[in-house]
Amino acid sequence: MNAMREQDGAADLAGIEEGQVFTSRPKAMTRERMRWYVDAQATAVANDGKPRFGGPTIHDDDDYALSQGLPGIIADGMVSTNWIMALLIEAFGSAAVRSGRLRTKYVAPVYEDMMLVCHAIVTGIAEEDGKRVVCLDVWCATPDDKKVTVGEALIRFPLDARGA
Amino acid sequence: MAVGRYVSDLSEGDVLGPVEYVVSPFTVREYCHAVEIDEEAFLGIDNQVAPPTLVHLDKLKLYEAACPAGTGPTARLHIEFDADYHRAIPVGERVEVTGTVSERFEKRGRTYVVTLIDMRSKETGDLLVRYRDTVILAYRQSAADETRGAA
């Protein structure tokens, strides 16, 4: 995968076509990855330049998760949402965070050590309100294709984007 | 109106915020590092920007301001993230965030709450992100296979 896919400040649509598929490398949803999010969340909410420990939550505390009727800790859905965002950034560069839409729905729990792969497929390229819009279906699934997060994304490019 | 105590008390029409803050390089780096968005534009120095997913944490800032007693008696479960974003958010930008509880409804014995959140540039008033967040309040798992995602 490339780094931020943008050169000389011009958005780049070259080579993007309907049906194109992007796939991330597999990642294990370890308890550390779950806790990193809990801590980052607490750090971001405090927003005072100091790292924080978050929790206890159903994402990082076994006893609390069990007390809530869960069989164990489960990942915050925003982890898979951000992994999908990372895939879009790899595929489309800074355009992926400049103007667009991302909708994700959490359709199954992600338990400790589940392996996940993120996917995006271009479902259409349209012109809308003076922009070129790339539409995608996105999802996060186990290696045997059990979907845990599903959704759609739009990425808006200026009409003069390279390849538009 | 049900602000002032627990998040689980929130009801349709409740207004959360506004909350104002400066998007800090530290926060963006910590957040992106945690979720493995590892491009230099997020973790580095030059022209650093925030990912639009960071807006999800504005909900927590709004909850903290409007519901000082915390979540409530049971865990909350995040069901859906839906953000429409209109331009990059550079670090150093002062933003203002407001939320409105647009729906509270029961479905299959669970209470769902939808919150609409706008993040705007404080200086220009430009809409940066419009976020629609859906959660289950007062979540307790009655059947593991019904579990959705995470809080």
Image (spheres, rainbow, N blue to C red):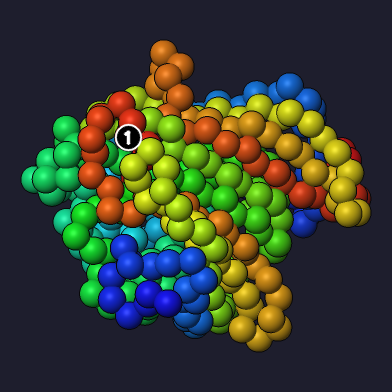
Q: Quadrant of residue A147?
A: top left
| Count of all numbered marks drawn on residues in the image | 1
B25 shown above or below A139: below
- Judging from the image, what secondary structure is the residue with disc 1 in? loop
Of residues A6 and A116, the one nearer the viewer is A116
Q: Residue at x 76, y 39 (%)?
A: A134
Looking at the image, the residue that sits furthest to the bottom is: B123
Residue A161 in view here = no
Q: Position of residue B86 (x, y in %)?
A: 70, 62
Of residues A29 and B78, the one nearer the viewer is B78
Looking at the image, the residue that sits furthest to the left is: A63
A98 shown above or below B147: below
| Residue of label 1 | B147
B114 shown above or below A128: below
Q: Which chain hosts label 1?
A: B
A17 shown above or below A51: above
Of residues B81 and B102, the one nearer the viewer is B102
Three-letter residue code for mark 1: Thr
Q: Residue at x 47, y 30 (%)?
A: A140
Q: Position of residue B31 (x, y in %)?
A: 40, 58
Q: Left or right of B17: which side holds B124?
A: right
Q: Position of residue A151 (x, y in %)?
A: 57, 36
